[in-house]
Image (spheres, coloured by chain):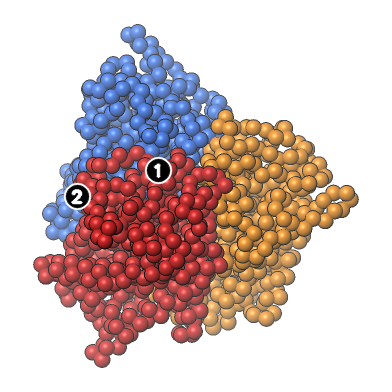
Chain colours: A red, B blue, C orange
Amino acid sequence: MTPLAVPPFSPIGLAICIFFILLVPFAGAGLALINTGLGRSRSAAHSMLASLCVMAVAATVYIVLGFSWQGFIGRPAHVLTVGGKGWNWIAAEPFFARGLALDGSPASLAAFLQMLSVGLAAMIPLGSGADRWRLGAVLASTALLAGVTYPLFAHWVWGGGWLAQLGVNNGLGRGFIDAGGASSIQALGGLTALAIAWILGPRLGKYSPEGMPAAIPGHNAVLVLFACLLTLIGWLGLNSAGAILFTGAPPGQVVLIGINTTLAAASALLAAAVVTRARFGKPDASLCANGWVGGLVASSAACAFTTPILAIVIGLVAGALVTLSVEWFELRLAVDDPGGAISVHAVGGLWGVLAVGLFARFPSGRVVDVTPLGLAQLRLPGSNSLQWLAQLIGIATLIGFVLPLTYGLNWLLNQFYPLRVSSDGERQGMDLYELGAGAYPEIDTTNEEFM
Amino acid sequence: MTPLAVPPFSPIGLAICIFFILLVPFAGAGLALINTGLGRSRSAAHSMLASLCVMAVAATVYIVLGFSWQGFIGRPAHVLTVGGKGWNWIAAEPFFARGLALDGSPASLAAFLQMLSVGLAAMIPLGSGADRWRLGAVLASTALLAGVTYPLFAHWVWGGGWLAQLGVNNGLGRGFIDAGGASSIQALGGLTALAIAWILGPRLGKYSPEGMPAAIPGHNAVLVLFACLLTLIGWLGLNSAGAILFTGAPPGQVVLIGINTTLAAASALLAAAVVTRARFGKPDASLCANGWVGGLVASSAACAFTTPILAIVIGLVAGALVTLSVEWFELRLAVDDPGGAISVHAVGGLWGVLAVGLFARFPSGRVVDVTPLGLAQLRLPGSNSLQWLAQLIGIATLIGFVLPLTYGLNWLLNQFYPLRVSSDGERQGMDLYELGAGAYPEIDTTNEEFM
Amino acid sequence: MTPLAVPPFSPIGLAICIFFILLVPFAGAGLALINTGLGRSRSAAHSMLASLCVMAVAATVYIVLGFSWQGFIGRPAHVLTVGGKGWNWIAAEPFFARGLALDGSPASLAAFLQMLSVGLAAMIPLGSGADRWRLGAVLASTALLAGVTYPLFAHWVWGGGWLAQLGVNNGLGRGFIDAGGASSIQALGGLTALAIAWILGPRLGKYSPEGMPAAIPGHNAVLVLFACLLTLIGWLGLNSAGAILFTGAPPGQVVLIGINTTLAAASALLAAAVVTRARFGKPDASLCANGWVGGLVASSAACAFTTPILAIVIGLVAGALVTLSVEWFELRLAVDDPGGAISVHAVGGLWGVLAVGLFARFPSGRVVDVTPLGLAQLRLPGSNSLQWLAQLIGIATLIGFVLPLTYGLNWLLNQFYPLRVSSDGERQGMDLYELGAGAYPEIDTTNEEFM
């Protein structure tokens, strides 16, 4: 019934896990700077403050409510028997994580990791909603993500839910596999970013009456590119901690995961540089940054199950895909996404999930001791075939269920509490209008051209 | 006699401790950016260089002298017998830490942690002395803190000194408890910041002849808010390493500590946003940043001994308290504290110390094995009553002894080596006057309005 | 034959090593910001993007090719017998690191550490080539470093090569010793920076027709000084991970290494402040930053083998040396090195290598258990005399072989693919010319004065 047995946890597992979990806030710091740097200077303080507030609301709501519905493998959950098989739909934990001893057990580590990751997912839409999304609405939308959308889907993937059960119950490979959150964190956040961008509509001046988009450059490329280095560190944490906690990877495998993660980011950056040079004559710094993060996003799902060579392939595809997708959303779909959040996190994340089906290789036995250190054992029950089908079902769930759900929730919110700032406020800039002060009061900026 | 037995230290304890200790410099990086961002652009390079120099002087002086007087539980110290009970006043270690094998033992880890923490305490006054405190005087003042004030008080709290002995000797709870340094690092630094602000006096143009304060906004809110994320990471290190080394917390408890620390920062931020919105109509980004850090500061003392719900309460109170305190110091006491250092670190720290008395719950036995991992044991001898009295005695010591001591030392210094720059220098900006070059030589800044 | 036996590796060794390895990217982030902040604003995005691309190319090339030639102690290599003794010249691993199980073994950890360190070495020349080095040429040059120069020299030092064998084969101390990469990362990168600066020539407007240098200040001192804090964190990782993996230091010794590393940076900063104040009347922020990093660089080689007092001495000398060297290269040699990369990394690194010969003390036995934790054993075979000669041979190899090699490779590259941008491009700024967009499009910068 339980698709994945929790590996017996050693002190060393705790030490390594806690270390990787505490790298995750660097991913948040990186996304905050990227979103801010790719936005306008007149909204810079607003963007950073919104990022902090998103983390704060997400962490609090998740501990108060979210974890109750996400839970962890082998812990209380609502199981529905269909066709003689038990399907696990939602966890059944008390609120405030009171059912859980916060003592270093795998379940408590998972709760800690999620408390930090859910904020990451909720920060992604700040990229697509930049320069026009009201702070109060950001917080309400964050509460919906941290309290409803995220824990529900993450339970299905990481809490022993029905997607993880596809292997044992239906013989689809090892069930849906996502070590580091390409689906539950990235694609979920990226699809929410799409919903937000649709509801908000494009920035004033972004599209001419004829529908031609204007290029509105970010105000600080140095912050954006510096932030890429922070995201690398954060993703090394995300991918390693996730692989250990959710797929039972032995601690020694963090070396493979670290090399794969770095190579995916590296090759995605180079792919983005080549593609933008080919299309525009010169490499584009912003799109290179998007490519780099897209490579990290795409590496998350399969990081523990591929070779370095395949990690490079995953990264190359991600970098090219993200770059083309940014153009496609801007030109074809007229979706205004200043930070490229949809392309980086939704497109990159879905590609990463698919890559598991294409490239991942799992140990063949049911229980395999893969480490010479004898620290843990890789236990992914299931078969060796049809893994791609399990991954496709996960992708279909994201597009067919999570996207409508997050769109619906935010559309409803918008009816009662409009997400978008007034036109006056947008012209004035979010900093002055919503916070009463600019980010750089001693510097004269010239940002009137796009109003 | 020894109030706290050092837990038997396992390799895993070393691994986890060293990891958390090395997160502490992020707290320093965060404070440096916050102080700089909340100051003027014409003093920005000075502020950052002063932060680096403070760290350098503090670390060096601490290893050369300070550790000799701080020591560690169970190591050589001067004990005075009063009323039949031994009271431990000051450590008796050789200079240059030569008495200590730097080999990963708990005492050596404590020395390493302190070497990094003392710089943190010494950076706090840079916030209140911004834009007018001479670099040479900063360094002299830092030497006094790292060589005298800090090691003395920290010995009493963390070195087995008389404050820690209040439990065993007088039956006041477990003795004065402060896991992460709300008193020894934060309140001590914050009270020194108050002393410095008093001695320096307000910036030119801060108060009108009628005593009305002018708002002088910080020059870069993005740096300030980014730095908040760095402080979170640093405090996760401070609180966890301190709890393990100084209160014998089992390594697995770092999960509880991490969740509590994050929730305290989160709720303090939200409280600051609500309070500033209520008072000024709009949330204030700088005060929100102050609130966030104030929540971290307040979390330090009790982080290992409360539930997540109580951590949220501690944070909410801290956020509101810090915000109101900033206004109170500026309007009522006419103390010019550009970085809010007094309110964040002194007020927030004292509240955190008090919160231990109000909320902390300790295991009931004298020696309790609280971890399923069998890694360490929580050993806080003493009773379960009157903990609040031990905490109040600590607060009284800070206000009644540490504040006069640090004020007196800096007052004396000021007689021989004036702390404040000349009026000309202040008008010109600390960068040009003391360093000969501005921080942003290619950008025209408009900062003449407050001169 | 093998000069250094790999210590038996425990799970705790893996945990501590992986943790320190993952701090290394902070060193890269720090160098990127330092190079960018010390450059002009019109090249800022280019500098940051080049840093990211350097990391990407270096990591990829190293895993594809470089590791094959670097290898690790006790693994396949080409050995040549000369005079009855076996000399190890180059490793013999398959490409793509396919011969290596990436499972947490010491060799796999070394590969991971190197993948991150080689990018660090390759980023150093960005400091000396700032504002005029074309992105395409940067990448080609990086590939040469990561594929040829670095793995070759690092094999000699860390892969059981002939420099490490000088102790066992010739009785020169313990053979050439460099725990954290003062030679293989820093001096190698710094000498490449010298080669690049020679090939590129000075920036337009740097020298008057009479040869007098103009001071061209960096555009953002705050970034530079903030980055110093990041480099400290990165170096704590480099020095500790290197000492454990390459010199068999017991994990507990990371406390000594951490204290020494911090004190070396601290004292080098203070030395630079004193020297610049003595020479120019005021401390210079940029040179203080250079001094700090120079202290870190110099600490790398001997960090595990000196006392804190000697670490302070190493730092003081490094800080003074770097400051004077910057002036010497600029005034006497007319080498234009905007970031001070040559002085910081080459001069600082060579001094650090020499300091091992002057100050290091090794355990006297062949195999010594130095830790009370029983975690590992220090095994540096060899004698206790003539260590200085081994170090001098290493220095001679760097200057006499590595410098000509890296100069020759880049000179050859320059024949086919010019390293320097056109004069038009240089006047326009690298951002606009090579990337098509500036880093700060909303800010008017005044940087025409030096054209």
Q: From what the image shows, is residue A362 above or below residue B360? A: below
Where residue C220 appears, as percent x and y from the top left, is 44, 63
- Identify the residue under disc 1: B237
Q: Residue at x 82, y 56 (%)?
A: C80
Gap between marks 2 and 1, in whole Å? 24 Å
Q: Quadrant of residue B5?
A: top left
Q: Is residue C310 left or right of residue A336?
A: right
Q: Which amino acid is tagged 2?
A: Ala
Q: Residue furthest top?
A: B84
Q: Is residue B80 left or right of residue A311?
A: left
Discs 2/1, front: 1
Q: Quadrant of residue A348?
A: bottom left
Say which of A409 and C136 sits in front: A409
Q: Residue furthest right?
A: C83
Q: Is residue C271 left or right of residue B339?
A: right
Discs 2 and 1 share one subunit: yes
- Identify the residue under disc 2: B271
Q: Residue furthest bottom?
A: A210
Q: Which amino acid is tagged 1?
A: Gly
Q: From what the image shows, is residue C279 above or below residue B186? A: below
Q: Residue furthest left?
A: A416
Residue B274 visible in the shown view:
yes
Secondary structure at numbered mark 2: helix
Secondary structure at numbered mark 1: helix
Q: From what the image shows, is residue A330 above or below residue B168? A: below
Say which of A268 and C105 sits in front: C105
Q: From what the image shows, is residue A293 above or below residue B69? A: below
